[in-house]
């Protein structure tokens, strides 16, 4: 097998493991149908399933999901901010992978932590295109000086998946556990996990990795975001009454530092000669 080298004379580590080889589409389809059927058998009616793949396989996976009766909620695009270049220059650089999020049926009730994802995204609704770097640097697990797993996923990717579609105490099953990223993130977020892996060398890596992950806080209120209507609301005027703000104080708009508003004694803001509540002024 010919090795591939980068311009800086470092070797490219591709995926050439036996588990990634199939005699043809028919064999791959049979394998995929078998494990997706097994997942469907143990998936709760209120649970959901995530599958990640590339253009090599994700279209076949999606078709089999639908054939088995799953209902696809989203296809999420993981845009890699630091993808591996196409060194031969014969096609575009493959800079993304696709995640399919599915439930057992079209009418299934499922968990979606909309408010948590919105808070994670700085107050904006989370979109289906996720910009995240590939696993690199100190996060990349090493074994005897080499990558411990060829396709280790970044924890940031699994963080979004688990935060979005599970709650504290839920059970997460990963039938292709690999280096244990799912288990590591599940432990951080207070979710229970089950990992299935056939390669002993990966089991050792995953077990050692997860043992070193700090346990989630025991206070479950720190692990999920309540809906906004359940949050206690503090009148803006109360901030003045308690001395946390003062009349005449200047407030700055995020992203618009040159535009300011001044606080009036009654709690209204004055901006460009007009007065209004903080919500009215902020929406202009």
Image: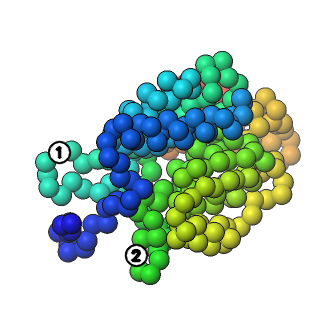
Residue occupying the point 39% across, 33% down: 60
**Residue 113 can be seen, yes or no:** no
> Element at badge 2?
strand
Residue occupying the point 69% across, 53% down: 193
- The residues bearing labels 1 and 2 have C-alpha atoms spaced at a distance of 28 Å
Question: Is 280 situated above or below 240?
Answer: above
Q: Which is more foreground, mark 1 or mark 2?
A: 2
Residue occupying the point 32% across, 54% down: 83
Of residues 108 and 127, the one nearer the viewer is 108
> Element at badge 1?
loop
**Residue 154 can be seen, yes or no:** yes
Spot occupied by residue 121 in the image (x, y as percentages of width and height) = 56, 42
User: Relative to 31, is 196 on the left or the right?
Assistant: right
Question: Is 174 situated above or below 264?
Answer: below
Residue 205 occupies which quadrant of the picture? bottom right
Residue 91: numbered disc: 1
Spot occupied by residue 269 in the image (x, y as percentages of width and height) = 67, 32
Residue occupying the point 54% across, 60% down: 198
Question: Is 119 situated above or below 182?
Answer: above
Of residues 120 and 102, the one nearer the viewer is 102
List the single residue furthest toward the right.
242
Of residues 230 and 18, the one nearer the viewer is 18
Which residue matches tag 2? 146
């Amino acid at each position: 097998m010919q090795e591939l080298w980068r311009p800086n004379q470092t070797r490219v580590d591709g995926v050439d493991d036996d588990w990634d080889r199939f005699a043809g589409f028919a064999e791959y389809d049979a394998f995929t149908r078998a494990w997706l059927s097994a997942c469907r058998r143990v998936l709760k009616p209120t649970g959901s399933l995530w599958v990640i793949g590339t253009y090599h396989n994700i279209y076949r996976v999606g078709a089999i999901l639908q054939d088995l009766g799953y209902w696809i909620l989203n296809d999420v695009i993981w845009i890699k901010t630091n993808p591996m270049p196409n060194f031969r220059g014969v096609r575009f650089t493959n800079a993304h992978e696709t995640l399919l999020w599915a439930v057992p049926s079209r009418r299934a009730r499922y968990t979606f932590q909309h408010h948590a994802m919105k808070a994670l995204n700085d107050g904006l609704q989370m979109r289906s295109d996720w910009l995240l770097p590939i696993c690199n640097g100190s996060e990349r697990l090493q074994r005897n000086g080499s990558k411990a797993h060829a396709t280790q996923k970044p924890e940031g990717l699994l963080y979004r998946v688990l935060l979005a579609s599970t709650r504290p105490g839920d059970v997460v099953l990963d039938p292709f556990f690999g280096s244990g990223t799912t288990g590591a993130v599940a432990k951080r977020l207070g979710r229970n996990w089950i990992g299935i892996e056939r390669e002993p060398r990966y089991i050792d890596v995953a077990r050692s990795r997860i043992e070193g992950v700090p346990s989630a806080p025991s206070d479950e209120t720190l692990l999920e975001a309540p809906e906004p209507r359940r949050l206690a609301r503090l009148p803006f005027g109360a901030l003045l009454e308690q001395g946390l703000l003062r009349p005449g104080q200047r407030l700055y708009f995020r992203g618009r530092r040159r535009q300011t508003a001044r606080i009036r004694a009654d709690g209204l803001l004055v901006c460009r000669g007009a007065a209004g509540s903080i919500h009215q002024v902020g929406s202009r």
